[in-house]
Amino acid sequence: MDASDSPVPRILIAGGGFRTAFIGLMAELTGKDRPRLCYLPTAVGDDPQAIVRWYADCAPLGVEPHHQISFISSYTQEASWDEVLLSMDGIVASGGNTLNQQAIWRAQGIDEVLREAWRRGIVLGGSSAGGLCWFHEGTTDSRPRVLTRVEGLGLLPGSHSPHYDGEEQRRPAYHALIRSGVLGPGWACDNDAGIVFEGTEAVRFVATRPEAGVYRVDLVDGEVQETAFPTELLGPGGVRTAGPR
């Protein structure tokens, strides 16, 4: 296989709200007629309600939904992480506690399996913790009292802030951490807005409500500079309903 035949690594993130429309877009990105999509609810402690909601969100779509819990037993988990996750066409990480998610993934070796999935062209994605986890670093509410820095898998360079319009502290905290040098520049997404990455390049900006935005946040001459990008409005199944706004 030469370089032109190598799979293209793709990641689809959202600031919050990775529901049917985003799952539909992920399905489209796999290029499969009926893609196998797996939900990893590690960040919510394998919450059963989150798992049920995943299957409900997938129901209107032509996908084969699966889920994989992380709190497992050798007596009941017969397949390895590699066997489960690398058999999928797409993997969605849940929102929740990013710090705990990363610790569990590292302890179980799931982090390395996800890196291999990305290299193989299995589409990765998620919102909140499920979007932040793919970046080098970002802002998290996983610790007491204040928003702090957390490290992710590093598949995407730079930093990320989810919930940019959904939580009052997110934007000022992200700006302050970038201004102080605690975080590098990066991408911010409002709830219901997201980015498609091919390799490490942002190639598409999408949203499920007109006012939801995507922003590049940089440090220029010591000052934070925020650039908004036009987004495509997605329909209920992830199909484009309008061009960039």
Image (cartoon, helix red, strand yellow):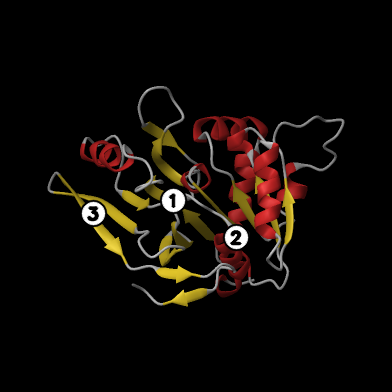
Pointer 3 or 2: first along the chain: 2
Q: Secondary structure at mark 1?
A: loop
Is 38 rendered above or below residue 147? below
Q: Are marks 1 and 3 in contact (CB under 8 Å)?
A: no
Q: Which residue is mark 3?
A: 226
The residue under label 2 is 20
Mark pair 3, 2: CA separation: 29 Å
User: Are dots 3 and 2 in contact, CB under 8 Å?
Assistant: no
Instruction: For marks 1 and 3, give the CA distance.
Output: 16 Å
Q: Residue at horizontal 25%, vertical 59%?
A: 227
Q: Is residue 44 shown to the viewer in this render?
A: yes
Name which residue lies at 60% across and 35% down.
44
Q: Earlier in the sequence, mark 1 or mark 3?
A: 1
**Residue at 69% over, 35% down:** 70
Q: Residue 171 vs residue 233: left or right?
A: left
Asked whether the viewer can see residue 7, the reply is no
The residue type indicated by label 1 comes to Gly
